[in-house]
Image: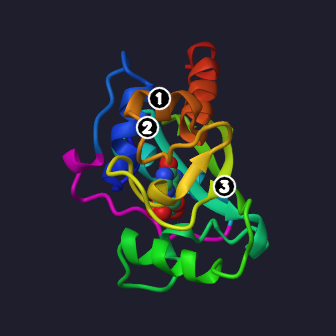
Amino acid sequence: MLASGNAGKQKEIAAILAGDEILSLAAFPAIVLPEEGDDYEQNACTKARTVALATGLPSLADDSGLEVDALGGRPGVFSARYGGPGLDDRARMERLLEALSDVAEPRVARFVCLAACALPDGRTFTARGLCEGRILRSPRGEGGFGYDPIFAPQSSDRTCAELDPAEKDRISHRGEAFRALARLLPELT
Ligand code: IMP
């Protein structure tokens, strides 16, 4: 089971774990994911546990965010809520670009992902992934989701929204976290 309502993340996690059968939360409309707090690990574990308990199936979740050095690590765990309610991805990116308008290059940042798997017997396993990079001055590319069009991973002159999905998964925070989680699980289930 995948405990996420974010279509961008769902697609990426399913591709990273290709070969395993993963059910989407859409098959269980009665399950409501809990409100998120201020800690990646706690948020990911709570989402995964909620779904494992409700379905009786091993459940995966992630909590992720974009940490910008010039903003003291913000928006971080609050990335999905940056700028307040009612904004879409594009408006949140614009807010972030405005907040960085006086900051000189390189505007160092990283994506962080905490992946969790909760088993119906109550055990929970976690793994973390990072993708270092920098924030550009304006959005580029049509792929990915969230802040991808303004984030260029280290050693790339393209944004995450300009990479093809398989390329992004190879270097992304989510790819690193879920591959590490998958390595833990065969021995544990
Ligand atoms: P949450 O994990 O549901 O709290 O959401 C994390 C938020 O961080 C997303 O809604 C995006 O705004 C941002 N984010 C996390 N991972 C990525 C990514 O791979 N690309 C772009 N934005 C991301």
Q: Nearer the viewer, residue 120 or 112?
A: 112
* Residue 27 falls within the magenta-colored stretch: yes
Q: Quadrant of the N terminus?
A: top left
Q: Position of residue 72 (x, y in %)?
A: 79, 73
Tell me if 99 is positioned left or right of 61 in this view: right
Residue under label 3, please give it.
134
Q: Which one is earlier in the sequence, the residue at label 2 or at label 3?
A: 3
Q: Residue at x 37, y 21 (%)?
A: 18
Q: Quadrant of the C terminus?
A: top right
* Residue 79 falls within the magenta-colored stretch: no
Q: Is residue 152 visible?
A: yes
Q: Nearer the viewer, residue 33 or 144?
A: 144
Q: Position of residue 47 (x, y in %)?
A: 49, 54
Q: Residue at x 74, y 59 (%)?
A: 106
Residue under label 2, please give it.
163
Dot 3: few (<14), some (14–19), or many (≥20) neighbours within 10 Å? many
Which label belongs to residue 167?
Answer: 1
Q: Residue at x 41, y 85 (%)?
A: 85
Dot 2: few (<14), some (14–19), or many (≥20) neighbours within 10 Å? some
User: Which amino acid lies under the numbered mark 2 shown in the image of this protein?
Assistant: Leu
